[in-house]
Image (cartoon, coloured by chain):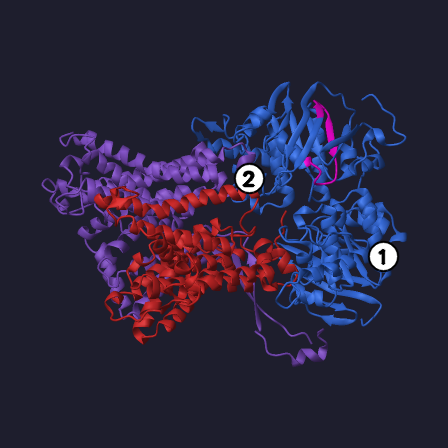
Chain colours: A purple, B red, C blue
Amino acid sequence: MSISEQDLSQRRWSFPFRVKFETRLEQPRWFSGAISLGAVILALILGGVVLKFVGGDPIRAYSFMVKASFGSLGVLSDTLTKATPLILTGLACAIAFRMRLWNIGAEGQFFLGAFGASAVVLTPLLPPDTSAWLMLPAMMIVGMIAGALWGFIPGFLKARFNVNEIISTLMMNYIAVAWNNFFIFAVWTEGGFQMSPQFPKTAWLPRLTDFGKDIPAFRGLTTHLGLIFGLVAAAIVWWIVYRSRWGYEIRLIGDNPRAAKYAGINIMRNTILVMMLSGALAGLGGMSEISGVVHRLQGAISPGYGFTGIIIAWLAKLNPFLIVPISILFGGLILAGREIQPSGIPMLIQGIILVCLIASDFLLRYRIRIVKLAREA
Amino acid sequence: MDLIIILQAGVASGTVLLFATIGEIFTERSGILNLGVEGMMLIGAMSAISTAFATGNPWLGVLVAMLVAGLLSQVHALVSIHFQADQVVSGLALTFLGTGLSLVFGEGLSKAGALSLLPTFTIPGLTQIPILGPILFTNQSVMVYIGYLSVPLAWYYINRTRPGMHLRAVGEFPAAADALGINVTRLRYFYVFVGGVFAGLSGATISLAISPGWFSQLTTSGQGWIAIGLVIFAQWDPVRAALGSYAFGALRRSILDIQGPTTLLGLRNPFYYNPYWGFFLQMLPYAFTILVLVLGSREAVRKRLGAPAALGLPYIRGERGL
Amino acid sequence: MNDDKNAVEMEGISKQFPGVLANDDVDFTLRKGEIHALLGENGAGKSTLMNILTGLYRQDGGRIFVHGKQVEFRSPRDAINHGIGMVHQHFMLVPSQTVTENILLGLDEPKFRLNISHYEKIIADLGKRYGLHVDPGLKIWQLSVGEQQRVEILKMLYRGTDVLIMDEPTAVLAPQEIEELFKTMRSMTEEGKSIVFISHKLDEVMAIADRITVLRKGKVSAEGVITADTNKQHLAELMVGRKVLFRLEKADSTPGEKVLVVEDLLAENDKGLPALKGVSLNVCSGEIVGLAGVAGNGQTELAEVITGLRPVSGGCVRVHGETLIDERKSSGRGVGQVRRVIEAGVSHIPEDRTHVGSAPNLSVTDNIIMKGYREPPIAKGWSVDHVVAKEHAEKLRDEYEIMAPTVETHARLLSGGNLQRLILAREISSEPDLMIAMQPTRGLDVGAIEGVQRLLLAQRENGAAILLVSEELEELIALSDRIYTIYEGEIMGEVKEAEPEILGLMMTGTRLEDIDGVEEVEL
């Protein structure tokens, strides 16, 4: 089996190039963003190919989508409305992922937040004529507590029993839907329809359109106070992660749990706290959607905000301030996607984006060099 | 609530979980974590039923389902193995991808037409065995019987054959396998494919045998995720996987049956008179999965067992420990 | 070039990695039936060269000849098929599988079915032939380190390799086991096999090798030198490129009061087996106390217990008279222990600087404040004052000469030596009363080693109490004022004037009082 000089010339033709992967030692600042952008563009192209395959027209579909989400003040406002819960679920996922806690349960925590907020109104914990100044904060707090509880359970199970949080948070999603359904169908049902009665006006988050009488330009705009919640939450989460002592601990645990233990950090306690914070953020998203958009509790309150939040967090590289603009883009995607047939397109595009994104991370760490193989005489 | 009926239906329903779990066991044993089982099952279910509608041949549907899911799994393999992406996120992406693709291509499927299903039959002779006969061998889908065979075959392959030994080595200590000339990359691609094929088989079992039809995402309703949890419960062993899968199948059937009769254990059946309590019953499989994970983790700590040591870690040749 | 007397010839080998030229036009010749040592410091290129020979890497330039014929290895399997095999420093054994399964791994037979008992017998016979006794039915995790090494060697012999490359094989062996290994090596060469012995330990190289090749910074500084023609001093110079001092300046010690007192510690290892069986020792301020012992005899667990990373089942640890660790405080999840130890002024230089001592994707600054982020001025209320932290990091970077482009650089981009300097900077700058230093010079080049040793001595002069655990006996002897020896979780003895033979005996299980010719001296 050894190769003598004669054998070499008789060898079968083999690929004349060798592809070498070399570790990249440093990268310019703009590189990371450019790669991510390239990944998204590639994903959109691939999505277009699939669209073509199913008999659609990708160019028309995409341009329609852009117009349908950003084409006028009205749709822009609707896009922002869709972006609001995304910002919050994106933040929820981002802070958990910082600690390598894979919270796939933002969807369920969102549902519980909606439940908590509804409970304030429907039980009723506060009478319907309570001032909005009391009602809304109460809904926020209860919504966040409910979401935090839904995050606490898998967090505790992980800390205490090392239960895989991916599966446990996912299971909690299904349980949350059933939980809400029970209350929607059996306890708070209105006239046999599968929804609760509409909330009193004091339980509605103020929307731009509410000021339409004074400012005509605002008429019909659905953007609501929840957007402010999202922006404030992004700033708070940024401060927590990058400036606070707690954030330092979170980042250290996420990067190397053994080193965190060596530094005297309590990993179990942080697991629980971070999951609770994550759940609270998603829960706030649920409350804001219920109180700002739907104004009642019903089964269909989320087209997968919790799952899209995962992609947003990853695309933003877990940076809270990047989550805001990316949420707006995805908000547009979801808004426009509602009117596109087939209905699976938005989810498919999100999946393709995620795949292209994680594949592109490779380029950040390695350089590709193609070496021409020279025959040795 | 006939116990025999529940177990009989449980075995049938559990076969779906069994295939998916065994497939994921093969994948994880090689060191790759594939969380995209739900997506692969869905696309398997959709491909199976769509092919069966188009050709009238359910077996062709099964074959196509296995191939399509296997192909989809290679996306995850490429991204995880060659691009060394985080396997958790890659698996989630695969779920989105599989779910999205199956929704897109499955549009309008439920209205397609008459469906020829996979055959069901009874095994003469074996069906006479007291208790076990009616449960295991009477009027079961052919897939169930295939499921029975797959358990000992999978076990034997993993534990008693040379390729199985290589599989285990690649998942435990890929560097050692590599140094001895085993192609870690090729084996991992292969076993991810095997996992995909089984997931596709599982999906086909749903849409062409156990719960025929196409109901978009509700076709699988999270069973792919339950399968991943079962892998941990099974401690990566096909025999335990079978026990867990069939137990879960029985649980799902019981949940349905428990809402039927007017009396339960001699008392007024609360689930019959308050049908909305059924929602709490719906939670059971998912709550049970969590319970199963807790039990599995505690046992692993006690027996010092655990996942394949290299699970989820990309293997790069030349990277040493310290 | 078609000399049949040579088992292996490597000609003009070059290999480039990003940022470093690991092998630069290296020539290496291995004669049949010889033991040829490949000498060089960490990072000199020895492992790279041998990895190329065993097919793990491909060379960028140069040719390889095996028994006179030119070869091109595309994978480790090619090399093995040519009779070249490597016994790695870090064993490539699957812990959960048996000896037999590990030896059979990667082979084409048995075809499909594993009939284990047939192969167990073959392997047992093979072991007897070469004096490598191992039970083929045991799982790897059940074996001792020395036995595992035997499995590695058997793995290669089973495949009929006649060129064996041994990468730092003595790192995990006690002196007596090293002797046995050398015997095995000589019996293999008598059968016509050729051995490459990679090492950085000059004594061993002088003892066992027929010829020596020295690598320095990727280049050959001496090729095929006959052992009889050289000495340690000469070799050290070839390795390092300048005259090397083997002595360190060490002032006399004036130990103060006891800072660390460990009493009758009982603890289990990760497998649930007893790792510490009643260990007692003490360290006073202003002294360095060494802990000698072959790796795996409890040193790691002892350090983990003292620093709070591992629970105890009996005994106690006292610092400055205050009980920090005992059975009661260890119960529960035991998380508060590490905090308590850190707050008591105890520094810990961990054994594993990449997986325990640092966070690879965090900046130098973030790594430096790992122990101090809770205290002002780095802590400010609930936050971390990033300006103060950055200044602190920059100050330490200059003081300890940590080579990093900026303090924002991620820790994983630092070289081993610089990472260790970072850790030392962190652990020393807090001016600890007690330092637990685990293998502080492992994997560093000679210059870095000297630097670390000087820092430790400086701390000693400042009055710190230092517990030093090291696998380099020479280093322990040079630095320590007193040395304990640990074997299988028990202290075998404590000596002030260290002699390698006595330490070696204790390291392999003989208690001090049982050694002939040793008088009980009042310490």
Q: Give the side of residue C251 with respect to residue B24, left or right.
A: right
Front disc: 2 or 1:
1
**Disc 2 to disc 1: CB gap under 8 Å:** no
Asked whether residue A163 appears in the rendered view, the answer is no
Does the magenta segment cover residue B84?
Answer: no
Q: Identify the subunit bearing mark 2.
A: A
Same chain, marks 2 and 1? no
Q: Residue C396: give its label.
A: none
Tell me the quarter of the picture where residue A84 sits: top left
Does the magenta segment cover residue C284?
Answer: yes
Identify the amino acid type marked 2.
Arg
Crowding near the residue tagged with mark 1, few <14, some 14–19, many ≥20 C-alpha atoms within 10 Å: some
Q: Give the side of residue C172 with respect to residue A68, left or right.
A: right
Asked whether residue C73 appears in the rendered view, the answer is yes
Q: Give the side of residue A91 with respect to residue C55, left or right.
A: left
Q: Is residue C148 above or below residue B200?
A: above
Q: On the image, numbered disc 2 is attached to which residue?
A: A258
Residues rendered magenta in the picture = C281-299
Q: Secondary structure at mark 2?
A: helix
Q: Residue C187: give its label.
A: 1
Q: Distance from label 2 to label 1 (Cα)? A: 44 Å
Tell me the quarter of the picture where residue B13 sits: bottom left
Nearest the eye: C384 or A266: A266
Identify the amino acid type marked 1.
Ser
Q: Secondary structure at mark 1?
A: helix
Q: Identify the subunit bearing mark 1.
A: C
Residue at image position (54%, 58%) is B30
Nearest the eye: C80 or C476: C80
Residue C99: image location, x then y, percent: 69, 54
Residue C339: image location, x then y, percent: 54, 28
Residue C54: image location, x then y, percent: 70, 62
Residue at image position (71%, 52%) is C44
